[in-house]
Image (tube, rainbow, N blue to C red):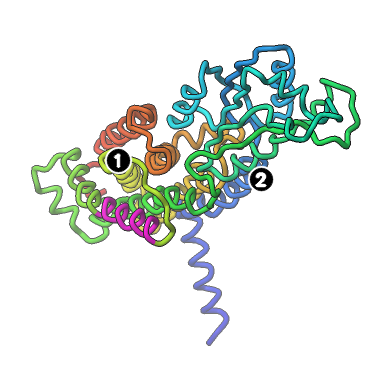
Amino acid sequence: MRLARILAVIAKELRQLSRDRMTFGMVVMIPIVQLMLFGYAINTDVRHIPAGLVDHDRSSYSQEFIAEIAATQVVDFVEIYATPQEAEHAITRGEIKAVLYLPSDFTQRLWRHPKFQPDAPNETARPVGQWLVDGSDTMIAASILSLRSMPLSGLANLPPNEPPPSLEVVNYFNPEQRVTVNIVPGLLAVILTMTMVLFTSAAIVREREHGNMEFLINTPIKPLELMIGKVSPYILVGLFQTAIILTAGNVVFDVPIRGGLDTLLTASLLFISASLTLGLMISTVAKTQLQAMQMTVFILLPSILLSGFMFPYDAMPEPAQWIAEALPATHFMRLVRGIVLRDAEISDLLPDVIWLAVFTVVGLIVAALRFRKKLD
């Protein structure tokens, strides 16, 4: 074993790496992307949760109470509803994550509280209102729980050692706050993203490396026909994986499946098609299967971190949310959690459905336009 031969191989590998722009770009970009995601976009301190408001009291005290809650910046009141039922439907549709309900006797409940009437009997210390929360996201539910008691320093100058008026918290869809209820549907989106994109990201590259491009050139098949043919077999694979994950989640972890199977099938088909199309677009850019795998990792990383699987979407800054909106996994994360956990219909989640359908169609067209039936 001679050092000169080892150094020659090292020099050859470094020269080859410098010529491979894709690999060199991944060496530089992946650490930068990870640093930006974890240092800037990822935030476990949930703030500005979109919330609704049902105020049946409509007094100066209720307005001040609402203002004090808004001042915490934990929630942003984005909509006012006439009844709690309307607000519940908004939670099911995913428009808001929580609702503050103040009853018509809010002022009476407030001033009968021992904080304001120390000599009053304990049985009058009822909750002054109620939070209705989408409990399927445990981190958001925990943040809302921190608002259960409000000091209300602006309403009265009373001894601080008295217990502040409290709000009752009702967690919908996951009253036990089990983490697996939130994780399993999200895991479906992550696994399908990884496998579907990986399967098709090397589809065209593999034809070149195996020498099959010559056969494709001599056939009358059109680029769009080839793209559809490449995608179609893996749709069944994706549906099979979906069935395995949801069945195992229901049997092993007791994750409920509240939505209809037809609705879930429609959402899964849209996401599988969009992920396979994304893989095809990667395949038309990559020159080797190694490059295709590197680009797949580059897509998979933000799909896990920004889609709402690990960290709440609402806790991210706006630039990170813009990136998340461009990823199919973000839209399917909303769909699958809405259908499986909240029994939402397709019509309730129409924006995400339309986005996935448009992405699939546009992606197939782009992949077909980029594909050329020639060896170079």
Q: Residue at x 82, y 20 (%)?
A: 155
Graded by Cα atoms within 10 Å as few (under 14), some (14 to 19) or many (20 or more), the crowding at tag 1 reads some
Instruction: Label 2, secondary structure: give it.
Output: helix
Calculate the distance from the C-alpha at mark 2 to the C-alpha at mark 1. 39 Å
Q: How many labels does the image show?
A: 2
Which residue is most to the top?
59
Three-letter code, disc 2? Gly
Residue marked by disc 2: 39
Q: Determine which of the numbered discs, if any, sits on residue 40 in the image.
A: none
Q: With 74 as the anchor, is 21 left or right in this view? A: left
Q: Looking at the image, is mark 2 or mark 1 nearer the viewer? A: 1
Nearer-N-terminus badge (2/1): 2
Indicate yes or no whether the magenta region holds residue 247. yes
Q: Nearer the viewer, residue 176 or 217?
A: 176
Asked whether the viewer can see residue 21, the reply is no
Q: In this view, does 224 lie above or below 246?
A: above
Percent from the top left, x then y, of residue 318?
58, 30
Three-letter code, disc 1? Gly
Percent from the top left, x then y, of residue 83?
51, 19
Residue marked by disc 1: 260
Q: Give the range drawn in magenta.
A: 237-251
Q: In this view, does 200 lie above or below 84?
A: below
Q: Residue at x 53, y 77 (%)?
A: 6
Q: Which of 207 and 359 is in front in this view?
A: 359
